[in-house]
Amino acid sequence: MTNGQRRDIHNSDIPIICQACEARHKGVCGALSPSQLTELSKNTTKSVHEHNNRLHSSDQDQEHYSNILSGVVKLTKLLPDGRQQIVGLQFAPDFLGRPFSTQNNVIAEAATNVRLCSFPKKVLEKFIEESPEMERRLHEQHLNELDEARDWMLTLGRKTAIEKLASFLVLIVSHIDPERSHQEGDLAIELPLKRGDIADYLGLTIETVSRQLTNLRKKGVLEIGAKRAIKIVNLERLKTIAESGN
């Protein structure tokens, strides 16, 4: 079966549960054949988690892996004194979990309402052994996450407060609405993190985050709505500020 056929949502060989799933098109499941998808779907569980729900702990044995179908997952590390630091964000259709590892080294929480498609660890690792393409996709995702982490180290270490906040907003737009991130026009989004978490992620104070949001509004880059709603009215200017602060 060709890759073109495998991606066709009308292909009758594809399980119904998988036909309209973006994780199959863009995620690791796209490496599986229809017969493998059928076998995987028999062990698949879909679930919805409200924001702030913990998805797994750093000391919890891994029994399942998941594809993120929608929403944003917050990854945190716990310090010895009990404080937590946000170390990453995951979006659809990212893969949640660490293959061939008994435990995760981070805490995963639902930053927004999150939908997951989960499957037993043993089942997926069997497919990883059978499908070099799936293993390659997992390696690619991990390398992409490493690249993003390195870029974020640069953001935290070298950028000003307004550049950090602009970089965060560009990151959110590029993952939540990637098609619109290259188009002109207003873009309404809901921030996946509350301001305290944004401050934690950026190494700033809540007051600084609020001040820089106001600064971006005054520059004509965005409009601030109720709760976490914002409207980006000049995305190109926001990208410029993220790179140079101007």
Image (tube, rainbow, N blue to C red):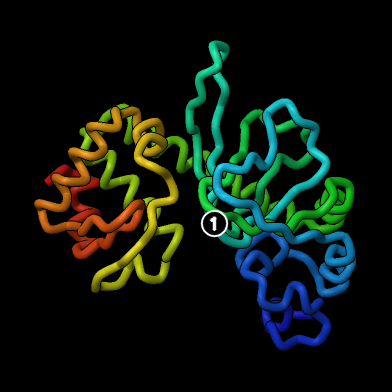
Q: Classify residue 231 by image quadrant.
A: bottom left
Residue at 68% in and 32% down: 57
Please name whichever residue, 49 or 116, is drawn nearer the observer in this view of the structure. Answer: 49
| Secondary structure type for disc 1 | loop
Q: Using the image, determine if residue 75 lies above or below residue 111.
A: above
In the picture provided, is 55 more to the left or to the right than 151?
right
Q: Using the image, determine if residue 123 lies above or below residue 146.
A: below
Q: Classify residue 29 by image quadrant.
A: bottom right
Q: Classify residue 75 by image quadrant.
A: top right
Residue 123 percent location from the top left of the image:
88, 52
Please name whichever residue, 201 or 11, is drawn nearer the observer in this view of the structure. Answer: 201
Residue 191 percent location from the top left of the image:
38, 52
Residue at 88% in and 47% down: 122
Q: Residues within 10 Å of mark 1 (few under 14, many from 20)?
A: many
Label 1 sits on residue: 71
Q: Using the image, determine if residue 220 lies above or below residue 5.
A: above
Residue at 48% in and 32% down: 86
Q: Using the image, determine if residue 121 lies above or below residue 221.
A: above
| Label tally | 1
The residue positioned farthest toward the top in the image shown:
81
Residue 132 percent location from the top left of the image:
77, 55
Residue type of the residue flagged with mark 1 = Gly
Residue 130 percent location from the top left of the image:
86, 56
> Which quadrant would the N terminus be assigned to in this image?
bottom right
Residue at 81% in and 58% down: 131
In the picture provided, is 173 more to the left or to the right than 218?
right
In the picture provided, is 91 more to the left or to the right than 176?
right
